[in-house]
Structures are given as structure tokens and as C-alpha cells.
Image (cartoon, rainbow, N blue to C red):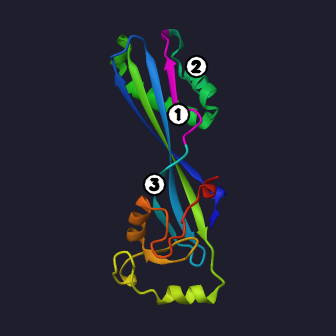
């Protein structure tokens, strides 16, 4: 199975909440990382999403910044945040969301506040299913008429082939299966290994 690094995309979801239960103005920033796995069938170009999975933790999973009254400009905050993250794009996204939240809740500036910022990075990872040159495997795949997970006709729903063994299942069935196991239901071959994401 080939991982396709040029097709990796990062989505940033930032949520901000405010609380006045603080002694000094503070921003608590939590960073989470997840992988959205997709499989691309090289024979017909079909792309199927197979789920959202935990990813290795980020180098800096939590940042706590004191927001001093004389240093609360977006430019200063951006500089301080980027000194931790070393990622100007991500730092800018977070600061923009924080500024947006601050503008919506203008009254909180009168007393000390805690701004909780949760950042979820979702990384799309695409894997290519190679077109098999072995006629035996292809013939076997064409003969599969029932999904071995739900035992229903394969032609009734969207289908997905697993990357290594090329066994075919209903998309919804194999997605559910892979949420709890990392192997093919038929041959037990491992579907994804850690090196696929490095």
C-alpha cells in the first residue's frame, strides 16, 4: 500500500470558550491530532473514506499563555504562540479565532478571564490500492457476490477493496469492522501499519 504524501491536507477546527474564574488573564490552548484515512482504488480512481483515527501526539500538546493587559495585541500574541508552535499558519488560525471570540465577548475584558482554546488538526491521508497483475486474485474478487461481514449481496451497496489483500466488502461494513480491528475479516492480513503514516 502506498501512502500519498502530496495529497495530505490539514483541517483546523478551533473552538474557544471563556470563563471569568481566573486570577489573571490566561489562554489555555489544547492541541489534538487525528488522521482521516482514505483509500484510492487505482483501477477506477474511486476514493473512499474509511474513518477518523487517533494520530501520534503533537510535539506541543498544550500551551498556557498569560495575557498581560499591556501585551494583548494580535501581533504580540501571534509572536508568542508561534515561538511554541513553530508553525506560522497554525498560529495565525488560532490567534484569529481568539480575536474573533474576544470581539464577540467584549465584556469579559473587565475582569480576569480564562480563554480555553481547543485545536483539532485533522490530517487526510490517502492510500493507493495497486492494480493487481495476478489474474488469480482478480478472478477471485470478481466471484465474490456476498459481503462476508453482513452476508448481503455485494451489488446492493458501495464497495471497498482492502489495500494489501484486495478482499472486497460493503463500505459501511468494513468501516465499522476497521474501527475495532486492523485486519481483513477474511485473511486477517493487517490493513494499516504504522509505517504507512510516516
- Residue 61 tag number: 1
Q: Which residues are magenta?
A: 57-69
Question: Could you tell me if the residues under marks 2 and 3 are in contact, i.e. CB atoms within 8 Å?
Answer: no
Image position, residue 64 (x, y; %): 50, 22
| Residue at 56% from the left image edge and 75% from the top image edge | 165
Image position, residue 107 (x, y; %): 33, 17
Q: How many residues crowd around disc 1 within 10 Å: few (fewer than 14), some, or many (20 or more)?
A: few
> Mark 2 sits on what residue?
76
- Choose the circle earlier in sequence order: 3 or 1: 3
> Mark 3 sits on what residue?
52
Find the distance from the CA under tag 3 to the CA under tag 1: 19 Å
Query: Which is more foreground, mark 1 or mark 2?
Result: 1
The image quarter in which residue 114 lies: top left
Image position, residue 190 (x, y; %): 54, 66
Q: Is residue 99 above or below residue 72?
A: below
Badge 2 element: helix
Q: Nearer the viewer, residue 180 or 113?
A: 180
Query: In the image, is 24 to the left or to the right of 90?
Result: left
Q: Is residue 42 above or below residue 82?
A: below
Image position, residue 7 (x, y; %): 61, 58
Find the distance from the CA under tag 2 to the CA under tag 3: 35 Å
Amino acid at each position: 500500500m502506498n501512502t500519498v504524501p502530496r495529497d495530505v491536507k490539514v483541517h483546523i477546527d478551533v473552538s474557544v470558550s471563556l470563563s471569568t474564574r481566573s486570577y489573571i488573564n490566561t489562554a489555555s490552548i489544547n492541541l489534538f491530532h487525528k488522521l482521516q484515512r482514505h483509500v484510492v482504488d487505482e483501477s477506477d480512481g474511486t476514493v473512499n473514506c474509511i474513518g477518523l483515527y487517533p494520530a501520534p501526539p503533537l510535539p506541543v500538546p498544550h500551551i498556557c499563555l498569560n495575557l498581560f493587559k499591556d501585551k494583548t495585541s494580535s501581533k504580540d500574541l501571534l509572536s508568542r504562540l508561534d515561538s511554541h508552535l513553530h508553525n506560522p499558519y497554525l498560529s495565525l488560525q488560532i490567534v484569529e479565532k481568539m480575536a474573533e471570540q474576544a470581539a464577540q465577548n467584549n465584556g469579559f475584558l473587565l475582569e480576569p478571564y480564562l480563554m480555553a482554546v481547543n485545536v483539532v488538526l485533522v490530517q487526510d491521508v490517502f492510500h493507493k490500492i495497486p492494480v493487481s497483475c495476478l489474474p488469480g486474485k482478480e478472478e477471485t474478487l470478481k466471484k465474490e457476490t456476498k459481503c462476508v461481514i453482513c452476508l448481503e449481496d455485494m451489488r446492493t451497496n458501495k464497495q471497498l477493496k482492502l489495500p494489501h489483500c484486495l478482499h472486497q466488502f460493503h463500505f459501511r461494513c468494513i468501516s465499522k469492522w476497521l474501527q475495532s480491528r486492523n485486519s481483513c475479516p477474511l485473511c486477517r492480513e493487517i490493513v494499516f501499519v504504522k509505517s504507512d503514516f510516516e
